[in-house]
């Protein structure tokens, strides 16, 4: 009962996390609210990104703690953790820079694509944890 | 046998649905796309609701936020529902016995009703909605979508009644064994 409830918090968390980042990425790509400043939109998104990050890391650590041996040897899990660290690092360095008013549109588009690809990899890695290395 | 059950059996045993069910790579890839769609575009629904509740982007009018997020929401919905139909088809007969699945479908139907009920007052109004209406629509939407998310996760936790499954009718001894278990 605890595990599925934690999973629900995990899903809610990554919707907040990846959804709020995707909002800014879609703006960087030019499709969403083109008349709004990217900087303002990223300020709107930032607190929800943090709440999401807190939710996924808390629920994720507890899910991991339920069976560490199963997870740390799982290749999908290892891939996911690598992608997650990269994605977080990217978000709080490069991504934070391209949303500033002076940044070029080209670098913004490239950063948005990379950001979406990184977060998609994290989600994909998470799904595949249940499908690799034999039965659960 | 109900028409829904015979339809579910027919659907599950179409070539493509069976192939998807037994694929060790395509099925998780479809699920991955389903979840990526939920994360990126469910976020758009979330921000629409957060604005309706007045918790985010308050400097922008409600109607502007709804309008700007409408197209990405539709794109996401198409991706998520396509993947969802593919996965549900591949396990149609099992899901027929899954009450989480039917609750999820009912909640999705309620969300459609919600969209129609608040269409003029909130979602497609010419003017910004009254704050009370906006808050009501936003909180109902958040509740319903949270329910959909919980039921979606719950689907995977319901064991299908093996003795009733058509698939196993081909192997009478296995059916008996499962019933014995």
Image (spheres, rainbow, N blue to C red):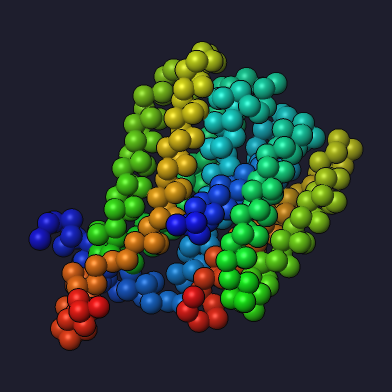
Looking at the image, can residue B151 be seen? yes
Residue closer to the observer: A26 or A127? A127
Quadrant containing the N terminus of chain A is bottom left
Determine the image quadrant of residue A57: bottom right
- Residue B10 is left or right of residue B47, and the answer is left
Residue closer to the observer: B5 or B70? B5
Q: Residue at x 19, y 73 (%)?
A: B163
Residue B103: where, in percent of width, then height?
A: 32, 47
Farthest residue, direction bottom:
B173
Vertical side of A80 occupied by A29: above or below: above
Farthest residue, direction right:
A102
Looking at the image, can residue A22 be seen? no
Determine the image quadrant of residue A36: top right
Farthest residue, direction left:
B1
Residue A70: where, in percent of width, then height?
A: 59, 76
Q: Residue at x 33, y 39 (%)?
A: B109
Residue closer to the observer: B61 or B152? B152
- Residue A20 is left or right of residue B27, and the answer is right
Determine the image quadrant of residue B166: bottom left
Q: Residue at x 49, y 56 (%)?
A: A2
């Amino acid at each position: 009962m605890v595990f599925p409830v934690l999973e629900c918090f995990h899903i809610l968390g990554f919707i907040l996390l990846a959804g709020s980042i995707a909002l800014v990425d879609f703006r960087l790509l030019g499709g969403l609210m083109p008349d709004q400043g990217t900087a303002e939109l990223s300020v709107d998104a930032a607190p929800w990104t943090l709440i999401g990050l807190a939710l996924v890391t808390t629920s994720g650590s507890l899910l991991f703690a339920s069976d560490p041996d199963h997870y740390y040897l799982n290749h999908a899990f290892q891939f996911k953790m690598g992608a997650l660290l990269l994605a977080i690092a990217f978000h709080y360095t490069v991504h934070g820079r391209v949303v500033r008013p002076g940044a070029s549109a080209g670098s913004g588009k490239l950063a948005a694509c990379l950001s979406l690809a990184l977060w998609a990899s994290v989600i994909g890695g998470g799904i595949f944890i249940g499908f690799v290395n034999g039965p659960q | 046998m109900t028409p829904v059950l015979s339809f579910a059996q027919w659907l599950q045993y179409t070539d493509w649905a069976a192939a998807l069910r037994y694929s060790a790579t395509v099925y998780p890839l479809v699920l991955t796309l389903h979840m990526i769609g939920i994360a990126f575009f469910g976020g758009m629904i979330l921000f629409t609701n957060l604005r309706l509740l007045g918790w985010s982007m308050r400097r922008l009018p409600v109607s502007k936020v709804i309008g700007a997020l409408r197209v990405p929401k539709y794109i996401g919905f198409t991706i998520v529902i396509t993947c969802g139909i593919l996965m549900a088809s591949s396990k149609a007969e099992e899901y027929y016995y899954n009450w989480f699945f039917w609750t999820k479908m009912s909640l999705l139907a309620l969300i459609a009703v919600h969209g129609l009920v608040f269409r003029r007052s909130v979602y497609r109004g010419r003017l910004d909605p009254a704050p009370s209406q906006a808050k009501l629509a936003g909180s109902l939407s958040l509740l319903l979508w949270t329910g959909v998310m919980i039921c979606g996760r719950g689907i995977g936790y319901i064991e299908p009644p093996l003795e009733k499954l058509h698939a196993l009718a081909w192997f009478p001894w296995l059916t008996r064994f499962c019933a014995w278990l």
